[in-house]
Image (tube, rainbow, N blue to C red):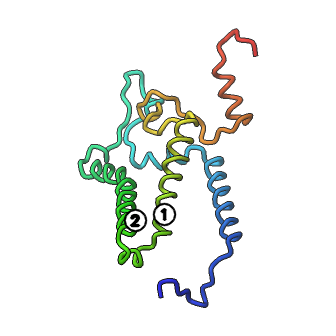
């Protein structure tokens, strides 16, 4: 009875789901392209004081007030370790299913495997090993807007784009041949 589907709600074809995701991706890309400071505008609801890159010469800049409250710091810590806890619970449940034949009939082993692979490939390999390691883009708290040492790069930077051309021209030293 677990896989019974109501006849009036048929499953969407895979191509429809794919196209919806592609349209959503381009809508998000267009939003960030047309409103390049949207992330700063949203974070300003949580960041108090002048943005550090625009701060006065005395070095004073804003801060994250919620970070000073122990409750929110604890919530932040719990949310950071939550994926690891989920992966551990999935592994333990899978091991119980492998060891116990009686329990295996109640445990969706295929779904557990898909969940483990998606946790490992998505956040693990793609985000941490590929995107964060090779994009050269600092985390927001590491940018000069929030008191960090790194310059805040443009949101979308494609090779040959206007942002990339401007960035490369700004990196050249005076007197360098073009």
Q: Which residue is mark 1?
A: 113
Q: Residues within 10 Å of mark 1 (few under 14, many from 20)?
A: some
As drawn, the residue found furthest toward the bottom would be 7
Which one is nearer the viewer's eye here, 131 or 85? 85
- The residue drawn where x is 42% and y is 49% is 45
**For residue 147, what is the image quadrant?**
top left
Q: Residues within 10 Å of mark 2 (few under 14, many from 20)?
A: many
Which one is nearer the viewer's eye here, 104 or 32? 104
Q: Earlier in the sequence, mark 1 or mark 2?
A: 2
- The residue drawn where x is 71% and y is 69% is 15
As drawn, the residue found furthest toward the left would be 70
- The residue drawn where x is 70% and y is 9% is 175
- The residue drawn where x is 31% and y is 44% is 67
**For residue 28, what is the image quadrant?**
bottom right
Residue 107: image location, x then y, percent: 41, 74
Asked which secondary structure carries label 2, the reply is helix
As drawn, the residue found furthest toward the top would be 175
The C terminus: image quadrant: top right
Q: Which residue is mark 2?
A: 94
Pointers 1 and 2 in contact (C-beta within 8 Å): yes
Residue 153: image location, x then y, percent: 57, 34
The correct choice, above or below, for 158 with respect to 79 in the image is above
Q: How many marks?
A: 2
Asked which secondary structure carries label 1, the reply is helix
Residue 65: image location, x then y, percent: 31, 44
The correct choice, above or below, for 84 with respect to 57 in the image is below
Residue 91: image location, x then y, percent: 39, 60
The correct choice, above or below, for 24 with respect to 54 in the image is below
Is residue 158 toward the left or the right of residue 148 in the image? right
Distance (Cα) linking label 1 and label 2: 8 Å
The label number, if any, that marks residue 62 in the structure image: none
């Amino acid at each position: 009875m677990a896989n019974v589907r109501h006849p009036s709600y048929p499953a969407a074809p895979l191509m429809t789901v794919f196209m919806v995701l592609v349209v959503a991706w381009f809508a998000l890309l267009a939003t960030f392209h047309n409103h390049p400071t949207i992330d700063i505008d949203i974070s300003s609801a949580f960041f108090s004081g002048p943005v550090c890159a625009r701060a006065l010469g005395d070095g004073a800049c804003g801060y994250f007030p919620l970070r000073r409250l122990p409750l929110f710091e604890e919530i932040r810590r719990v949310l950071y370790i939550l994926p690891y806890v989920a992966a551990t619970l999935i592994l333990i449940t899978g091991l119980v299913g492998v060891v116990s034949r009686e329990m295996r009939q109640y445990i969706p082993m295929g779904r557990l495997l898909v969940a483990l692979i998606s946790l490992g490939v998505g956040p693990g390999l793609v985000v941490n090993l590929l995107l964060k390691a090779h994009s050269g883009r600092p985390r927001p708290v590491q940018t000069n807007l929030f008191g960090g040492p790194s310059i805040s790069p443009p949101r979308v930077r494609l090779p040959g784009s206007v942002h990339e051309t401007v960035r490369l021209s700004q990196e050249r030293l005076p007197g360098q041949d073009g």
